[in-house]
Amino acid sequence: MCYYRCLVAYAHVQTVVVVEMDEVRDDILHVLIRMQLFLPIKALHLYYTIGTLGNRIVRRLVVLAHGDTDVVCVEFLAEPYSHGLSSLANEETFALDVKKQAAKIEELFGCKPTVARNSSLIYSDDIGGQIAAMGFKGMLTEGAKHVLGWKSPHYVYNCNIAPNLKLLLRDVELSDDISLRFNNPDWEGYPLFADTYIDRIARFPEEEQIINIFMELSALGIAQPLSSNILDFLKALPACAKEKGITFSTPTEICMKVPSMGAIDVPDTLSWVDEERDCSCWLGNAMQREAFNKLYSVADRLRIADDPRINQDWDYLQASNNFRFMTTKPSNVGLDRGIYSGPFDAFTNYMNILGDFINRVNALYPLEIENDELNALLTTIRNQGDEIEMKDKEITRLKARLEKLEPAAKEPKAKKAPAKKPAAKKPAAPKAEK
């Protein structure tokens, strides 16, 4: 599955809009990108975070982002490559997952992410500390009421155990008004118009400068069908914002320019999912926990082995939706289980696939070999491989040198000029007799 996210940021009030995309829709991307035409240069910024992208999708994204105008500013955010839950299970695996995705962004677009977000905005103090240790300046997460208490999400905060890591918190109500309630005729705010929406932002107290709006792309065209005029609503937002003096910034600009109001204490893990804003939608029942624990029981072994084909399937198996499909929780948001008829069907199918996967891992690296022994063995193999590679390079260099010398050796030697014969001496004249 392709995961990538689109962010649009505004400031006076500075609003950061995150759209989580599971597929690429040209019409939606065009609306998001062309929104900047209503604003002064660099007033609106579109930026995307990419998980796993095909080259075709990358080309379309770049063309859409840069084809119409050069005033669009794009910022790429880091996140787990697999869109998985490794941050809840294995610190080393989580770090590798984030660095893998950041490296892919640098490879494709030539820029290194400086702000991160976890899958589904999962966050805790410990996770923030891990992100800060990777060198990121900021992180996006949920503005959950049970964490904030009386505090407002409209400020920049920082991680409790890593003060240098800035936190941008989602405005739950403003985000869900678009992603969940926009087309609901029973909602008291229906119908929602762009000017009404911007007026609400403009009425916030002057000191509340940061408004973060994060949502899934499925809100645009799926949860909120195109017939609801959701795209026209988005297209009208920038003009309404301009009238109110609302400007735009990227997450990195906000993290660099806006000081933190203080630390947020998050000892327990939170996310942006369900009313509880926790991880119970993935790990709330015994089936989910059994699948989760079995999956990450081989995490250290896989990291040591680093087999490309195994790693690819490992990424697929880590995807958070695999565990979401197994949930037995009631939810106010409709859950699409895809091909599965229910949580038990999803669990049975996943465990069958996971069992086959672990058998493949054990066939390559038997359980009789301890992790330390396997690590030493693979290190030796890699060192031997590096040595062979160095020797191959030396052989190639010597062959190239030999090829240069051979033509010179084959050239015929220049003929030597014949030596001059010594001049013949004249016979001495006979002496006269006396």
Image (spheres, rainbow, N blue to C red):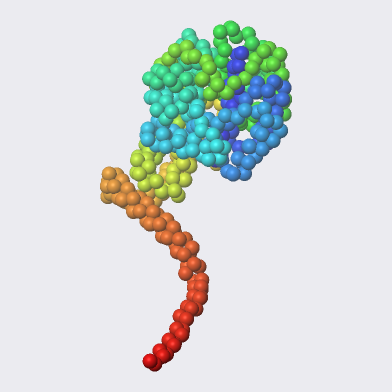
The residue at 51%/20% (across/down) is 255
Task: Give the farthest residue toward the bottom.
Answer: 433
The residue at 48%/23% (across/down) is 138
The relative height of residue 135 versus residue 292 in the rendered view (above or below) is: above
Residue 247 position within the rendered picture, expressed as x and y whole percent measured from the top left: 64, 17
Q: From this viewpoint, is residue 359 visible?
A: no
The residue at 47%/24% (across/down) is 137
Residue 308 position within the rendered picture, expressed as x and y whole percent measured from the top left: 44, 48
Task: Give the farthest residue toward the front.
Answer: 434
Quadrant location of the N terminus in the rendered image: top right
The residue at 47%/45% (across/down) is 312
Residue 293 position within the rendered picture, expressed as x and y whole percent measured from the top left: 37, 36
Q: Nearer the viewer, residue 166 or 422?
A: 422
The relative height of residue 381 versus residue 327 in the rendered view (above or below) is: below
In the displayed structure image, the side of residue 112 where residue 195 appears, left or right: right
The relative height of residue 374 versus residue 275 in the rendered view (above or below) is: below
The relative height of residue 176 versus residue 60 in the rendered view (above or below) is: above
Q: From this viewpoint, is residue 312 visible?
A: yes
Number of numbered discs overlaid on the protein picture? 0
Residue 400 position within the rendered picture, expressed as x and y whole percent measured from the top left: 47, 60
Q: Nearer the viewer, residue 364 or 157?
A: 157
Quadrant location of the C terminus in the rendered image: bottom left
In the displayed structure image, the side of residue 168 where residue 224 appears, left or right: right
